[in-house]
Amino acid sequence: LARLPFPDPQRFDGSYPDNWRNATSVFFRAPDAPRLWIAALDQGGVGLVQTATERMRGRKFFYFGNAPGGKHWMDFLSQPGKGDYIEIQSGFMPTQNQRFAFPGNSEIHWTECYAALEVDAKQTHSAEYDKAVAAAGLVIDQRIPVAELDEIDVFLREVASRPTDRRLSTGSPWGGRDERLMARPIAAGLDFSTPEAAQSAWDELANDGKFSPAALDRVPSDFAVSARWTAALAKSADAHGETWLHALLLGLAALNEGRQTDAADLYSQSLEMKPTWLGYRQQALVAATHDAAKKDYLLAWSMPDAPPELADEIVEFFRKTDRFLEMSRFLDNLAPAVLWRERVVLARAQVAAQSGQVEELEAFLTTEFATIREGETLLDQLWLALHRNKARRALGREPTGAELADVLTQNPIPWHLNFQMLTDHPVPLDDMSLN
């Protein structure tokens, strides 16, 4: 984080998001302001405002920047050609980088409001930023008076603890599990029961303090690592004997706490009692060597109930450890349904890039990928590898940097592959990670 005046006109007017070249987050701090709000208004002065009661102090905007990847993300999140996408956000702390201790058995209340807003465009886009803020503030005070918001806040605090008389939706069963484990309600007025939810090993632990034979026959689909649940697991193991599931779940909690050696011991104990795909996968995470991790990953994949998502993780492990030959062997044995998982397709493209299979790589790169993460440069690297391989074939030798730069100028990365987030940091031509 860095502090700067806002809108910082000595560099550029940061109050217009598209003046920021690269993806950026701006946190606003105005401790002396009579009222905190944030608004995003368009050329005509029309947009959205957020304000809240005094306890909510944080405000932020996020913009994807002007690099091709940022524009690509904005098109994905809005609509191509119909305006750029920005976020205005709010939070309890001044910035997202800050944390605070939330005391047990305590409550924090605030009420916030999002509303449409229209301000005179001439005032909104005044040459003086403070005048634009003042004009917007006057309209906000009329649209959402502080006294009215405070009155709504008092009302909502009163109704928050009333019993629920009608269920509108059902969420995760973990709230109800916690209540049963603690043998008390979490908070007055909140109904965490989920009677239609399927019973799991965690429900048995909360209800009976032990696991049934049915629970011990399968790997759970969700997990808890808090001190309360870890204590319940330890108590259950002491009272009824440790099972493979106790050891596995205690291992997950140990790894979450950074106790890697303890976690490794617990995973080993679990696998001795019952080999499971998750036991092997967890053991791979704490393995002392890449060879040991590879062995455990492949054992995990060999289990009949291993989920397809595990293949994504395994090919990523092979990529990060530069094991493209072993990745190729793994891919050769995958079922057709798994072969077309998107991260597996990307792994197949990487193998094609490594082995100079130009036609195969080019075919893979016609795909529009949906699992690319912000800042990920894999598609850039694959496009570079494709044209490096094409240039090798045409020249009969390794292309020089200048020759490769010329090829890429003539063959710029297509829009559907371009997620470069920095305007001044393209993938270097000497990036040999896929060569």
Image: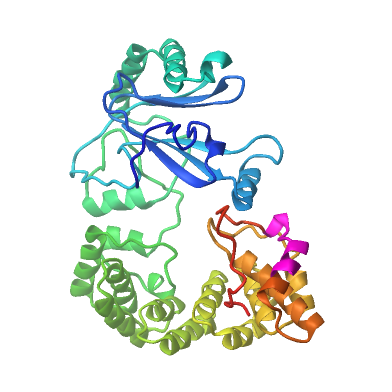
Give percent across and percent down for residue 104.
Answer: 18, 45
Residue at the right extreme, as displayed:
394
Total numbered labels placed on residues in the image: 0
The span picked out in magenta is 405-417
Q: Is residue 386 visible?
A: no
- The answer to whether 336 is drawn above or below residue 196 in the figure is below
Residue 86 sits in which quadrant? Answer: top right
Give percent across and percent down for residue 416.
Answer: 71, 56
- The answer to whether 178 is drawn above or below residue 56 in the figure is below
Q: In the drawing, does residue 409 fall left or right of residue 378?
A: right
- The answer to whether 239 is drawn above or below residue 332 in the figure is above
Give percent across and percent down for residue 65.
Answer: 55, 45
Q: Nearer the viewer, residue 50 or 286?
A: 50
Identified at 30% across, 81% down, the residue is: 264
Q: Nearer the viewer, residue 303 or 13?
A: 13
Which color scheme does this rendered protein use? rainbow
